[in-house]
Amino acid sequence: MEINTFKTLNQINVDDKTEKKGNLDYLPWADAWTILSNNFTDINYSVIKSNDGCNYHHDGKTAWVETMVSVNGKDLPEQLPIMDNRNKSILLENITSFEVNKAIKRCFSKNIALHGLGLYLWTKSGPQKEMLTDYQFRALLEKGTTTQAKTVLQKWDATPEQLRKIKDKFNI
């Protein structure tokens, strides 16, 4: 059976791993790589170097990095400008190795998002949840455990009344 890499990664909620930069949420590269590595073993990451062997590219004025992440044989390249702390491109003559490294790691995280992990941080739609049916709700209240209740709250949309009853029953 073929595993749908995008679907698998896109369903993972990374809200507990995100950090803020200004008013933007982002998934740190180390967390993205850890989650990816815990879900797939056929993965690879590389920096696409310029023709002269440099780890960034430029147009004579500004610069950008290019990275590639492969998951299960699917290669997805991505580009990202080398920017300052206000997300503005840095002039070529002012770029330091520190900014290049930060851009590479940001681009790397963006690559992983193209494979599905945390992509909703860019779309603001969140991982898709399924509705909790009355049957599932009743079964949970009758025979469920606290662990099952927490899983249900993460993976299913409950009505406000269902949510209140689940939280009351399981003290969560």
Image (tube, grey):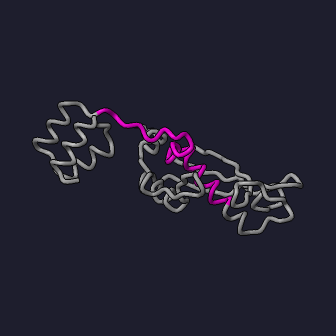
Q: In this view, does 126 lie above or below 26?
A: above
Tell whether position 25 is magenta.
Answer: no
65 lies left or right of 46: right
Asked whether residue 29 is in view, the answer is: yes
Tell whether position 106 is magenta.
Answer: yes
Q: Where is residue 157 in the image (x, y as percent from the top left)?
A: 32, 37
| Residue at x 84%, y 59% (from the top left corner) | 91
Q: Where is residue 24 in the image (x, y as percent from the top left)?
A: 57, 51
| Residue at x 55%, y 39% (from the top left corner) | 123
138 lies left or right of 96: left
Asked whether residue 73 is in view, the answer is: no
Q: Nearer the viewer, residue 37 or 103?
A: 103
129 lies left or right of 77: left
Q: Nearer the viewer, residue 117 or 51?
A: 117
| Residue at x 20%, y 35% (from the top left corner) | 136
Residue stretch rendered in magenta on the structure: 103-131
In which quadrant of the rendered view does residue 52 lie?
bottom right
Q: Is residue 162 above or below residue 150?
A: above
Q: Position of residue 6 (x, y in %)?
A: 49, 40
Q: Position of residue 86 (x, y in %)?
A: 70, 57
In which quadrant of the rendered view does residue 54 lie?
bottom right
